[in-house]
Image (cartoon, rainbow, N blue to C red):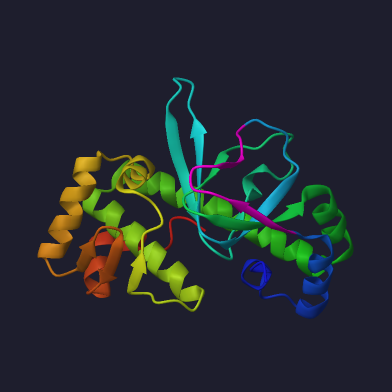
Amino acid sequence: RCGVRNCFFPLAVEATCLARLEDIVQRGRIFNRGEHIVDQSTPCRACFAVKSGSIKTSIITESGEEQVTGFFMPGELVGLDSIGSENYACTAKALERTSICEFPIDKLEELTGTLPALQHHMYHLMSLEIQNSHQLAMLLSKNTAEERIAALLLSLSSRFQRRRMSATNFSLPMARNDIANFLGLAVETVSRVFTRFQNQGLIKARGREVELLDIEGLQMVSREFSRPCNN
């Protein structure tokens, strides 16, 4: 019910792991749009599975500016980058009305110590988190605005598809200014690229509603960055 099958699947002893996870999960927390789920530098006590809605993570730089670091959708885990640390590395904020399930870190660590398959998969998830950070760094340092936005759209497409949702018709959970911040672009640049993609027949966009008309064309634009850049 909290999306743990998406977060922790596949597991060699899936039924056992899921049953034990159900024992420690804390359900039912709901946040309205704009509400903070956790704040950067506060004590880290849990990681979270997104049950419904969407979440944005960000950090506050030394100059006091917000830098968006990721977007999370149903079935995805928030807070993996803080496990093993005293405090949360990022602030997590609801992008819309969002329901989460909470996994207390101490209980999760105790559980992974008794279930080797779960421990292995947690290491796998953390490894993916590091790989995605590397991909994002490469994306922001080398690619054009067109390549960055194409890569983000393809990432969202693959993530929706993994959750048995449409890979070509979806609603963007984030606003254009969050996309611009995340990709290191100006908001006006993001709007121009969306318009250009639409004129080229690659996408059809109306507000936050997006239809991907030419996946192969977007992959050609994004080059090697067609793999997910987050999660």
* Image height of 134 relative to 66, above or below: below
Relative image position of residue 187 (x, y in whole percent): 25, 41
Q: Residue at x 84, y 68 (%)?
A: 20
Q: Quadrant of residue 118?
A: bottom right
97 and 128: which is toward the camera: 97
| Residue 59 magenta-highlighted | no
Residue 229, percent across and down?
43, 56
The residue closer to the viewer here, 39 or 221, is 39
Residue 36 colored magenta?
yes
Q: Residue at x 27, y 71 (%)?
A: 212
The residue under the point 32% across, 74% down is 168
Quarter of the figure with residue 101: bottom right
Q: Quadrant of the N terminus?
A: bottom right
Is 144 on the left-hand or right-hand side of 22?
left
Residue 226 % position (x, y)? 35, 64
* Residue nearest the viewer, comparing 88 with 206: 206
Q: Position of residue 6 (x, y in %)?
A: 61, 71
- Identify which residue, 208 or 119, lies in the foreground: 208
User: Which residue lies most toward the left here?
Assistant: 199
What residue sits 71% from the left and 60% below the top? 122
Q: Which residues are magenta?
A: 27-40
